[in-house]
Image: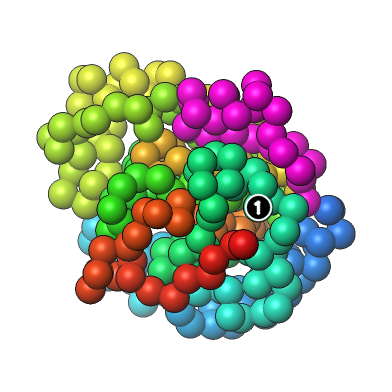
Amino acid sequence: MLLNNKQLEKFHNDGFLVIKNFADKKLCDEILEASQKHIKDMIEPIESEQEYLEDSNTTTTTLRRLRQVYDREDIFKDWMTNKEIRPILEQVLNEKAVLTLAHHNSIMTKMPKESSRTTWHQDRRYWHFENDNLVSVWLALDDEYLENGLLEFIPQSHKIDFSSDRFDDKTNFLDDNEENIDLIKKAVHTNLEKGDIVLFHCKTLHAANKNITDKAKVSFVYTVRGISNKPLKNTRSDFKEVILD
Ligand SMILES: O=C(O)CCC(=O)C(=O)O
């Protein structure tokens, strides 16, 4: 499958693109099913909500993300190496894609009630590559909407070079900075249905609310880099990778 010119232009212009109905709904159900035991038993490595809270002295652990999912189940690996998406990844990266397993290699959850808001940020904040030619692929395994923590994006934010004072010391984009307030007003969202994917650039500002519904939201996210955009040596981005030939 290939993007048409309008879709490709939209991706480059906005910094993200929703592709409706990309993955088979049955595949989404199977991925979700395979993720259940990892979620229920919080099988490591995981990221917890508590890691994101400033003054958390609770002993509870709420799952936020299953990390390093590529090697956990064949069905996860198969999704991340899916052949149908490769021409699209090559289009948006403008060169061959390499799956980088260091960072977004995750099943992302928003647990009912216990999840927290994900503040505005750019994904490249903790990544170390030669440049910013990195794109993430988000798969909705079920319906996603604002009340259960749908991703929201700020169109064209990937084109802006922000000064560091617009972020806090954890590189969250400050909600109360005057210039940021104006930009955040431009945020958009598109409800997702099972099987929809979203491609987003590593500089595109995005955020998500907490899940206020009674059902967990579970999504899959992985990242690819352009083949010429190498991870910097001796950083955490310099990790196992898969060339998507
Ligand atoms: O679902 C979320 O909390 C946001 C996830 C996110 O920002 C990301 O994976 O880059």
123 lies above or below 165: below
Residue 174 at x, y = what percent?
24, 35
Give the camera-side residue of 120 and 14.
14
Residue 85 at x, y = what percent?
69, 51
Give the camera-side residue of 137 and 60.
137
105 lies above or below 38: above
Quarter of the picture holding the N terminus: top right
Q: Residues within 10 Å of mark 1 (few under 14, many from 20)?
A: some
Does the numbered disc 1 mark a residue whose Cβ is under 8 Å from ligand 1?
Answer: no
Residue 125 at x, y = what percent?
29, 51
* Colour pattern: rainbow
- Residues rendered magenta in the picture: 1-23
214 sits left or right of 125 in the view: right
Residue 14 magenta-highlighted: yes
Q: Residue at x 84, y 53 (%)?
A: 25
Residue 53 magenta-highlighted: no
138 lies above or below 28: above
- The residue that mark 1 highlights is 86
91 sits left or right of 223 in the view: right
Q: Residue at x 28, y 32 (%)?
A: 175
